[in-house]
Amino acid sequence: MKVKWIIPGFGEPHIEKKSEILDTNIAFMGGVKPTVHTYSPDRPGVVGEFLLNKEHPHLMRDLDAVVVSLDDCELTGPVPWDYIEECFSKGWDVISPSLENTLTAFPHMVRDKLPKDTSRTSVAEFFFYVMTPRAYATWWGYIRRENPWLWGMELTMVNTMMLKVAITKRFSIIHHYAGGSRGLEGRNKHFAEVGRTLGDVAKQPCFF
């Protein structure tokens, strides 16, 4: 498979541990090398800003998959590229690994909670997405500068973006660090733009 792997934001805090995580992930990505967008006090940047400024969907048109991952998410084993290719051939748009720990706002993503080997879901928190180029273009099209942390977008991938999303046991990650609350205003703006409310999205089933 022709794959691009994007890490849209790499830096402090915990830079030493994140560097270890990056080395581990490179070893498990089967030869796929990352495009790492770094930030620092002198060169600030946020996830959505890096994606909007540097990773336009037209750059992905000739690929088979686009991976977008956070710098604090550690793979626990090899990415099953053959299986992901099979999933894409069956119409899946986005594949997310399951979690080995519970550091998530959505407990159904924990590996032991999945009802199937690969489970269709209405919500997959943004940790490590493997997407078709078309799905990436759709998802990217909802990124806004006023919501650079991408909050709320995981809750509209299915009901608004109309993407077919799955969480799988075939590979998993450990999410190392909790995020803050800086994205609440951006989340609310995203919901307002797409005509959703927190009550609407909260009614979605975890699995189909």
Image (cartoon, rainbow, N blue to C red):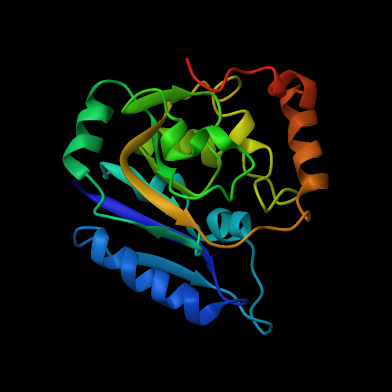
Tell me if 48 is positioned left or right of 180 in this view.
left
Tell me if 155 is positioned left or right of 21 in this view.
right
Res 164 visible: no
Residue 185 on image: x %, y %: 83, 46
- Please tell me which residue lies in front, 20 or 37: 20
Residue at 67%, 52% (x, y): give it: 149
- Please tell me which residue lies in front, 180 or 45: 180
- Quarter where residue 118 is shown: top left
Residue 185, compared with residue 177, is above or below; it is above
Residue 57 on image: x %, y %: 44, 45
Residue at 51%, 20% (x, y): give it: 162
Residue at 45%, 55% (x, y): give it: 174
Residue 180 on image: x %, y %: 74, 58
- Please tell me which residue lies in front, 150 or 62: 150
Residue 38, compared with residue 122, is above or below; it is below
Residue 30 on image: x %, y %: 19, 58
Residue 48, compared with residue 13, is above or below; it is above
Residue at 74%, 18% (x, y): give it: 200
Q: Please, which residue is most extreme toward the bottom here?
A: 42
- Please tell me which residue lies in front, 91 or 121: 121
Res 47 visible: yes
Tell me if 22 is positioned left or right of 84 in this view.
right
* Label total for image: 0
Tell me if 192 is positioned left or right of 44 in this view.
right
